[in-house]
Structure formats: structure tokens, C-alpha cells
Image: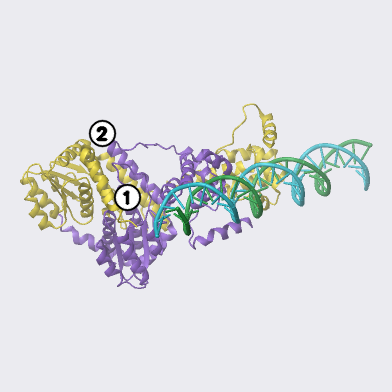
Chain colours: A purple, B yellow, C cyan, D green
Amino acid sequence: MTQDVKEIFGSPGGPGYAPPAPAALTAKVRTLAPSMTRSMQRVAEAVAGDPAGCAALTVTGLAELTGTSEATVVRTARLLGYPGYRDLRLALAGLAAQQQSGRAPALTTDIAVDDPIADVVAKLAYDEQQTLADTAAGLDTVQLGAAVAALAGARRTDVYGIGASGLVAQDLTQKLLRIGLIAHAHSDPHLAVTNAVQLRSGDVAIAITHSGSTGDVIEPLRAAFEHGATTVAITGRPDGPVTQYADHVLTTSTSRESELRPAAMSSRTSQLLVVDCLFIGVAQRTYETAAPALAASYEALAHRHR
Amino acid sequence: MTQDVKEIFGSPGGPGYAPPAPAALTAKVRTLAPSMTRSMQRVAEAVAGDPAGCAALTVTGLAELTGTSEATVVRTARLLGYPGYRDLRLALAGLAAQQQSGRAPALTTDIAVDDPIADVVAKLAYDEQQTLADTAAGLDTVQLGAAVAALAGARRTDVYGIGASGLVAQDLTQKLLRIGLIAHAHSDPHLAVTNAVQLRSGDVAIAITHSGSTGDVIEPLRAAFEHGATTVAITGRPDGPVTQYADHVLTTSTSRESELRPAAMSSRTSQLLVVDCLFIGVAQRTYETAAPALAASYEALAHRHR
DNA sequence: GCACCAGCCGAAAATATCTTTCATGTGTGA
DNA sequence: TCACACATGAAAGATATTTTCGGCTGGTGC
């Protein structure tokens, strides 16, 4: 019965409600931190910083530790996707156990101006690997599946992205074209909107924006949304404005950035993984046509190589 | 006061009081089972049989499931060495998480047409992580350092790439521009050659090609090479034709491809890591001008977000 | 067979913990 | 400067856990 209550409580968020995160917690904290209030950030920080320690604390204990109130702790737990503190605590215990078994190498240091080039390579590779793991762990497969289904059945697909995200948009477009779908990437906001209003039910529009608040990308998505197209947002801020007009939201992970390592770098890695997943998913679904199309495009390029 | 009672209860076992068991829970259940009463055995059995499931239950839930009472559940938890049910539950969650993560390594197989979407995500992430590790391990830091030095001192830089590699070329260009360097990406072979012949000593030309034999990219590099520019090749085939005209060769890793997972995917990941390393390297070397330039471009974009 | 005892067991009270509500403070934009 | 919206914590309310306590079962001696 208590279970039922929880289930009912959990549902209103949406039908394909995201289940609690097992290991993606640290990533989720980073993703959601910007949208948190100060006290909630303190709680989230404590939780991400010492999962094992926090798992041993009661709400009251954690509230005292972070100098906040029980209410704030519960609110933070909710924001992180759990029904309440109790469940966050369980997840924390799980996380602690995982960390215990698989010892973390903790190459946490930032890239410094005077790092030798070999260190730069190692740190960058490590960071990007971390970003991939976080993204994979935090990706909502239900949303992903829905987006794939929409893409596979679309008459036509438009993809919007600006700056670094524009390259990701182009990457996705290139791939979709290779399996015989009709796709366009737009980085010119005016043209994007112009094209978006041509979309209709059954078409798909995808907006890619790390910040979730890039107006030039949101506008075309909105136009597509209002014209009945199925809309997808790939963003690092699942609470950002862009999601207003998105039927499906795919969250990319946000890792810490530093002066030398702009956010664009890890967001790009994350976005590309999501885009790859979309592509493979669609290729699976349309295998009958995708496989020969892939083979054909492969062959067409062969003679371009000496 | 309640605490005191607990302490007294826990103490008789010995002064060096045993801390809660981490993963040895199943073993402990078996060891202690004979000394348990019937109902306690039922509880212990349920706990050992399905840690994850039991971790999701409250005392009442577990009592109902095993057809016993809350008191019995608590007694069992005590017998297993925990202060109470709450702590047993946390341990259970930890155990479940460990088991969960333990059964991950079955990822060696290729992505199949009928793989569920969650597997696709996991496999892709794993593969790309592998690619990153391979690339980092195989990258020649001496060549990288030389390329960085050339870039940092270049009057102007041209980057050639076609198809998927074209996006990587654009990515590098975008980054270099952001730290105040002069860089252009070319994916039109004719224009690329036209521009290449304008280069001279002190300029840098970079060709990005996975196969190492893309004529449309080799030609401009050759032109640049012959006009005295410093040339760099980023390729997966260090023995390919492109390296003929390259002063410095940066090798990207080639991982196995499959029908659904074209080579372009992992080569792109690999190329991007190399490009990122180049960028960071150059940013380090030109820190005095790069840092303010980065900050400025960051700020210029701020107002584009709502 | 019957009375008795030891200890298992669960219902319910007592306590701890978690969740919600609500009044207050605090910063922000007009 | 005012008004508003939102963040925050104190305390009330709801749940979950722990303890208490008395009934019950199964065995044992007479």
C-alpha cells in the first residue's frame, strides 16, 4: 500500500517517468546544480562529495551538516529525481558500495597552464571518458526510444544547432542521410524558422543546445512544435526553456569546466554520444532499408580514395 | 537513551564491535541460519534471495512478504549484525548496486539489430571510451608538441576535412578562432587548393582524414607543403599517402567497425580528442592572449541566452 | 492426560524519522 | 521605494521503525 502511494506520487511527472538513478547521481547533481537554490546546492554538493558519509545520516543529520533544514534536504532529493529522502539515501548507499568495489582513480585535477603535453592528453582523455559514462548513465532510455521511433517514421527531419552544437547537428544529419532518411541541419536561425513552419504532424524537429536557452535554436523548435511536428530537445539543462516545446528531452551531461577547458568541449562529447545512440536506434528500426543504404554510401566513397 | 540500549545490546559480542557486513551478507545468512527460528529464517532467506527487491521494502512490507511481523524482521536484522532494519536495508541497497555493476562486462559483443536501446547506449559509450583510451595511448606527444608549436606561432592556419572529418576540421577552426588565431576550415576541394597556394612558410596546414587516402584532402595539403607551409596530418593510417606531405603526423586510433557502426563514428571520436589536445596545447602556449580571448567570446555569447 | 515452562511470535504502543505546511525573510525588478 | 516572487526553516503532520508486552506453541515431567 505504501508502495502504491509512492507509485502514484511518482507518476504525475510524466508517463515514462525516469526511474531513480543508480550511479548517475554525481552526473545528475552537476546537471541540475545550476537550477538549484543556494541551500539546495550545499546539500547536493555534500551528497555528491561524500555519498557514503551522507548515506549514514538521517534527514536531520544531513540538514545540520549542510546548515540547512530538513525541508531543503527533502526538496533536493526530489529535484534529483527521488520520491523522497529515504530513496535518495538508498541510492547513496548503492553508490558508496559501487565506489568501494571499483576504486576510483580520481584524476580530478584540472588542466593547468604549465601541464606537460602528455598530461594534457591523459587528462583530456580521462575527462571525456568520464563524460561518456555520465551521459550514458543519465540518458533516459524511454525518451530515447520515443525519439527513435519518431525519427524512424518521420517524413522529414530538421535539426537545429548553433556554434559547437551546430556541428553535432550536422553530424546527425549526415548520418541520417546515409541510411536513406530525409534530414537537414540548420544553423541559420532565419532559415531554420522558415523551414520549421513547413513541418507538420509526422515530421521531426530536433534542437541541440547545451545551455537549453539558446534563443536562435528555441525559436525554430517552437515553430515546429506549434505546427504539429514531433519535437526533440538534446540539452544539458532539462529544465531550460527549450524543453517547453519538446515532446522528448534527451539530457546530456555537464561536467565541470575550467578556464582552459570550455564547457563546449565536454558538452560536444556528450551530445555526440546521444546523437550516435539516436542514429543506431533508427538504423535498427529501419534495418531493411538502412543496411543497403549504408552499404551503398560506403561503396560510393570507395573510389574517392586513391 | 535508546542509543544506550542499543549499545548495551550490541556490546556483549565483544569490545571490538563488528561493523556492518558489506557484501558478505549472503554468507552470513547461511552461517547464521541454523541458529535462527523459523520465521527469522524466512526473513533471512528473502533477504539473501533478492537483496534488491527487499531493499525496496519497508519493515512492514518485508514482514508481509515473509508472512511474519515487523518485530521479527527487526530481530533478524539484529542477528545479522546491524543495529536495526534501517541499516540492513542500506546494506541491501549497496549489495544490490554491486551486483548490478558486476554484471556489466558482457559488452564485448557487437551491436546487434535486435539489441534493446539500453544496450545500445551502454555499448556505444563503452566503445567510445575504448577509442579514447586507445587514442591517448597511441598519440605521439613529440609530434603533438611540434604541431602545437607550429600552430601557436602560425600567421594563419588552414584545416582540410571532408565528410565526417569536415566537421572535426570545423570544430578545430571554431576553437582556434576563439583564442584569437586565424584559422579556416575547407571542405570544398577546389577552394581548399586555391587557398593552400596562398600559404607560405610560418603558416600551418592540417589535413584530417581517417583513411589517409582521401584525394580531396591530400591535394590541398600537398599544395601547402610545396609552398613551404608547416603541414600536419591527422589520420588513422600513418602509412597512408597523406603522410607524404606531412611534417607532423598525429595518429588516430582505428577500432573495429560493424555493419551498424560505421568507422566514421569511432574515428570521429578519436579525431576530436586529438583536435582537443591540439587546442589546449596551443591555448597553453598562447595563454597571455588566449585567456582574455576565451573570456571575451564567452561573454559575447551570454546575451544570446534568454 | 494434564499442568507447566521456555521461548517464539506478533499486535500495538512508543519512538524516531521523514514529509508537508505555512509563516517569515530576502533579494529583485518595476 | 514598493511590491512581488521565491527561497527557507520551524513546526505540525504522516510514516516508518523499534520496543514492549502478552498470547501462543511445543515440548516435558508427573
Residue bearing mark 1:
A269
- Horizontal side of residue B217 vs B134, given as left or right: left
In the rendered structure, the answer to whether residue A289 lies left or right of residue B241 reads right
Q: Quadrant of residue A298?
A: bottom left
Q: Foreground: B15 or A74?
A: A74
Q: From this view, report whether residue B58 is shown above or below residue A46.
A: below
The reply to whether residue B82 is visible in this rendering is: yes
Residue positioned 27% across, 45% down in the render? B295
Say left or right for B190 vs A55: left
Q: Is residue B52 visible?
A: no
- Badge 2: how crowded within 10 Å, few (<14), some, or many (20+)? some
Q: Chain of mark 2?
A: A
Amino acid on which disc 2 is placed: Pro
Residue carrying label 2? A116
Residue B84 placement (x, y as % from top left) = 65, 40
> Which x, y percent locates residue B29?
62, 40
Q: Amino acid at mark 1?
A: Thr
On-image quarter of the N terminus of chain A: bottom right
